[in-house]
Amino acid sequence: MPFAETLDNLPLSKSDVVRRFEQLIGPKSEAELESMARTSRVLTLQNFGRTMRLFAPLYLSNECINNCRYCGFSRDNPILRVTLSMREVVAEARYLSEAGFRQILLVAGEHPKFVSEDYLVECVRALAPDFPSISIEVGPMSIQDYVPIVGAGGEGLVVYQETYQRAVYAELHTAGPKRDFDYRLNCPERAYAAGFRRIGIGALFGLWRWQEEAIALAAHVDYLLRRCWQAQITVSLPRLRPAAGGFLPVFSISDRELAQLVCALRISFPQVGIVLSTRERPSLRDALVSLGVTMMSAGSHTEPGGYTRRGTEHLHQTVRGRIIPPEFQEGQDQLATGQFEISDDRPPERIAAVLRQRGFEPVWKDWEQALSG
């Protein structure tokens, strides 16, 4: 039974693990929360040691055929768009390699014309010699489309459901293939069948009540651990950030609640990786290091060409499917528009130094494709 069916029956069929998780994210006193934090620290050290995996996103394209009310790349937003050429992708990757990264996440909006299976295969194949760990975060695809990407050297897939509430999802996704809730929800299972060895999921907090999203997310993790048991599962907890389009979230999750959620996930799923992005401000990221987070992005740009300022000569706007030349305002930075605003803009070496000061070892590389045979 695919997870889509499990989700629909979730109110009546929670596993013991999910029921325990639900209790952990309920109202807690300061003493109870500190007890959770102590348990979370111990479990993290037992399963991951004093290490922190560092990675960087490499945005390939901000073209998109979907209308998502909260996303800066939404097709109706009059933003500056570009899809990087292979030479530009390699230049961006070289910049990240020189900064120390060996783990990268290739990110793109969903647009089969600009970000095709062949384009992704070419990107992965070009970068594989220098990056032992390459993951992708793109529009959901079929098993058949994923297989060549895995064959080229892709080892991880990241896909966020955004919200696990069907009605909310339908309201927020007004056009494009992303409207298909179930196809997106079952994407991790297709990725596993295609051979990806790392699978990352998450919800975008701010679209609905955080506790309900967290319970559904925990149920999804629980399901994947049982059904995709040979893959490494990671979970991300992004909070909405300002982006083009000006979407204002009605719901929120506080710093305290986010810390509680990290602890609840670690206690419930001791061996699952927890990812924290540069959406969060430096002080909070530093504080969450010891609570259960095991993987962090660093020095991130969310616009294609952001690291090297490549691709600017191809900038354009897309209006009703037509590509038109951009109109720049005086003093406007001539770069592609980013997906969202970054909160932690510290360079990678600074983040690595802070980790060492806190007794953690930054891990730039933890996998070698040759070891997989």
Image (cartoon, grey):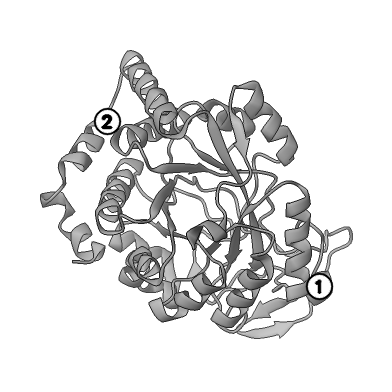
Q: Residue at x 69, y 53 (%)?
A: 301
Q: Nearer the viewer, residue 116 or 304?
A: 116
Q: Tag 2: residue type?
A: Leu
Q: Is residue 346 visible?
A: no
On the image, which quarter does residue 82 sit in?
bottom right
Residue 282 in the figure: left or right of residue 314? left
Q: Position of residue 54 (x, y in %)?
A: 61, 43
Within 10 angstroms of label 1, few (less than 14), some, or many (20 or more) residues?
few
- Label 1 sits on a secondary structure element that is loop
Tell me if I can see residue 246 in this picture.
Answer: yes
Q: Is residue 326 above or below residue 26?
A: below
Q: Which residue is mark 2?
A: 24
Residue 194 coordinates in the image, percent (x, y) = 40, 71
Give whichever of 116, 175 is nearer the camera: 116
For badge 1, the amino acid type reads Glu
Identify the residue at horizontal 48%, vertical 30% (top origin): 49
Disc number for residue 327: 1
Where is residue 317? Give x, y as percent: 71, 76
